[in-house]
Amino acid sequence: MRPPAPNIDTMFRETGALTLLFGFACLPVVGQVGALAILIVMAFGRSDVTLKCLAAGATVATISLSHEQGGGGSFLPSGLRFVLLFAAFARSLVVEGQPTRIYGTLFKYWGLLTGILIINSFFVSAFPGISIFKTISFSVGLLCVIRLGMLTTSKNGEMLLFISEMGTAVFFLSVPLLPLEVGWAQTRGLAFNGILQHPQTLGVFMVVTAAASFAAAFKFPNLQRILLVCGFAQLSMIYFTRARTALAAIVIGVIVFIIEFVARGGRGSRIRFVSPAALVLAFLGIAIATILVPSIRDGFAEFVRKGDEQSLATAEDREEALRTGSRGKQIFDVLGLIEEHPVVGYGFGVNPDSERMMNSIGAQLWGIPLSAPVEQGFLPIATLAQIGIVGSLFVWPFLFSMYRFARRGSAEDAALFAAVLGVNFGQMIFYSLSGEGLVMWVTLVLITFRGGEFR
């Protein structure tokens, strides 16, 4: 028997509770630690509560007002973040559920991918200690999310609604910061990060939660109008973040929607208030207006350049501008790494600067590497750089199988899946099961299981 559908009162209560939780996490010193401690205790409840605590904890981990960025006081929150992950993982293992075809397929690919990552970490990686820890955190986190997705299949829409509510809570807490200096920590006030740690983090987070809002809107007709409003409100925040990654993810989602809509002959759409054909025409109209109208084109160009970067079109040395522009050097460095290690990569979760970066920020606790940032920009080249051609042969079939299940629902489900995954074409969070990376994976898995409802 399916649980009753949530109503507007339930949505307001949960959003209010999340707003209070995230607001508490903004308090210096004690906020983030206290919020994570509360979620760890609550995570031992029902499977749906466990999944909600896991997603909420990942969001708490990205809140910046609870401690100074780059400060040494982040050890305890980082440790508690992993305690929450492993507590949720343990809870997911002890609860019995009815395995589905989707779960069986994803579990098979998870096992193959985990095996190749373990081999890569021990026999290929230049920094085995870091790679092994990242393999453990990625594999444990991914299996936890897959199992919780399976255990909450009957409440799939409710879980998507919760992700939407998280985005709404962050939106409500961030909007009051727009006229202040607190939420504009980057690029001389040109990019807005709200209550989260970076403008890119906020932009990517809003793409993911907006996708969940739209998916939940198709699930609950009684909440459809308000969820659509919430989704578009979350997307509007992207303008202030100047997050080009978020914009690229939206474009990817729209392109996939057009392809799927045409491939299905216009059948099976769940959009009720506006024709999908009208959406396609609106997107094409915006694209044409951007090309033909100078003011719109200039505004878009300023957004893309974040207002202060040299335009490739006006640069005297375009190759040099490309190499030194945003992410340019990063991409060329990764391409060089791929050229040197094409078959098996340099090592999972690492690059030549990983150990130096980890030591410089002191991100170790009792010898355990809590953080070793890897900035490799784009999912395809990052995968090749880390685990090579061999590893890629295990990653892409896994993603294709998820997309195949997700697209069973509708063209909209396929587009939402593509948009969420698309954030990895500028903000590589695919292999990071913490922060916005964990929220991304929860949403991807929920959309995947949702698509499996339609056979």
Image (cartoon, rainbow, N blue to C red):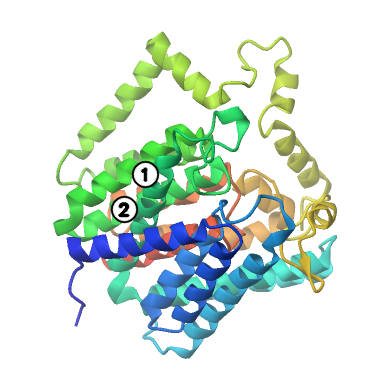
Q: Position of residue 437 (x, y in %)?
A: 55, 57
From the image, tell me which residue sits under label 2. Answer: 213
Q: Residue 430 carries which label?
A: none
Answer above or below: position of 421 versus 46. Answer: above
| Of residues 331 and 390, the one drawn nearer to the viewer in this rendering | 331
- Identified at 68% across, 69% down, the residue is 135
Horizontally, residue 383 falls left or right of residue 338, namely: left
Q: Can residue 219 be seen in this view?
A: yes
Disc 1 on helix, strand or loop?
helix
Answer above or below: position of 432 versus 206. Answer: below
Which quadrant is the C terminus positioned in?
A: bottom left
Answer yes or no: do the residues labelled 2 and 1 have beta carbons within 8 Å? Answer: yes
Mark 1 Cα within 10 Å, few/some/many (few <14, many 20+)? many
Q: Disc 1 marks which amino acid?
A: Gln
- Identified at 39% across, 18% down, the residue is 290
Q: Can residue 269 be seen in this view?
A: no
Horizontally, residue 452 falls left or right of residue 392, namely: left
Mark 2 or mark 1, which has the lower sequence index?
2
Q: Disc 2 marks which amino acid?
A: Ser
Mark 2 Cα within 10 Å, few/some/many (few <14, many 20+)? many
Answer above or below: position of 225 versus 45. Answer: above
- Identified at 55% across, 80% down, the residue is 87
Q: Where is residue 401 in the image (x, y as percent from the top left)?
A: 46, 62
Q: Which image quadrant is residue 96 in?
A: bottom left
The count of marks equals 2
From the image, tell me which residue sits under label 1. Answer: 234
How far apart, in angstroms, are the residues tagged by discs 2 and 1? Answer: 9 Å
- Identified at 41% across, 70% down, the residue is 52
Disc 2 on helix, strand or loop?
helix
Q: Position of residue 418 (x, y in %)?
A: 43, 49
